[in-house]
Amino acid sequence: MSLGNNLFNARKKRGLSQEEVAERLGVSRQTISKWELDETLPDIGQSKKLSGLYGLSLDELIEFDLDVKEIQEFIDRTNDAVSEKIDWTKAWSQKYPILATYQNEVDIPVYAAELNRLLGDLEKKYGYNELDAFLVLKDILAYVWKSRKH
């Protein structure tokens, strides 16, 4: 994502118009537009003011990723009771349709038995509780997935 996109998304997240930002920084609306279109760059002083206005550090402003930040905020706000009510398979199947159909194709008990064995091994060998063992196994699966992509 470009700095211009970062500035645009950060401004929108704060609910500010280009005019409002321009007024607070003492620049023209066209200047804000040029920054957001990557036609020009704000200087360091303006960048510092922008980060304060948007409630972000300079590093966050440069690397601002709206989706990741919103997901993290959602995770932080979601307690375990609410999380238990969410049908995560249904939610994720909107993006990954295989999650809605694999149950009719895959011999789940075979894979579940092996995963349960691995979970038990993590609990016994490392003293993890059930949830921690599950999270470690999930993270190992993510590691394997990333290593296969390269």
Image (cartoon, rainbow, N blue to C red):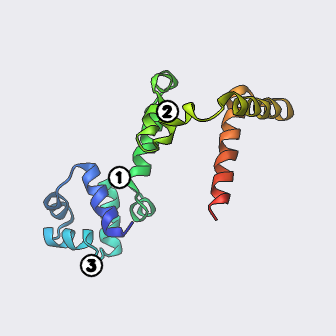
SS at circle 1: loop
Residue 132 percent location from the top left of the image: 69, 32
**Element assignment for label 3:** loop
Using the image, tell me which numbered label, if any, was put on residue 36.
Answer: none
Q: CA distance from mark 1 to mark 2?
A: 34 Å
The CA span between labels 1 and 3 is 22 Å
* Tag 2 residue: 89
Residue drawn at (74%, 27%), measured in percent from left and top? 129
Please state the total of marks drawn on the protein image: 3
Tag nearer the camera, 1 or 3: 3
* Quadrant assignment for the C terminus: bottom right
Which mark, by number, is residue 40? 3
Figure quadrant of residue 102 = top right
Residue annotated with mark 1: 55
Q: Within 10 angstroms of label 1, few (less than 14), some, or many (20 or more) residues? A: few
Of marks 2 and 3, which one's residue comes earlier in the chain? 3
Q: Nearer the viewer, residue 141 or 67?
A: 141
x%, y% of residue 105?
58, 35
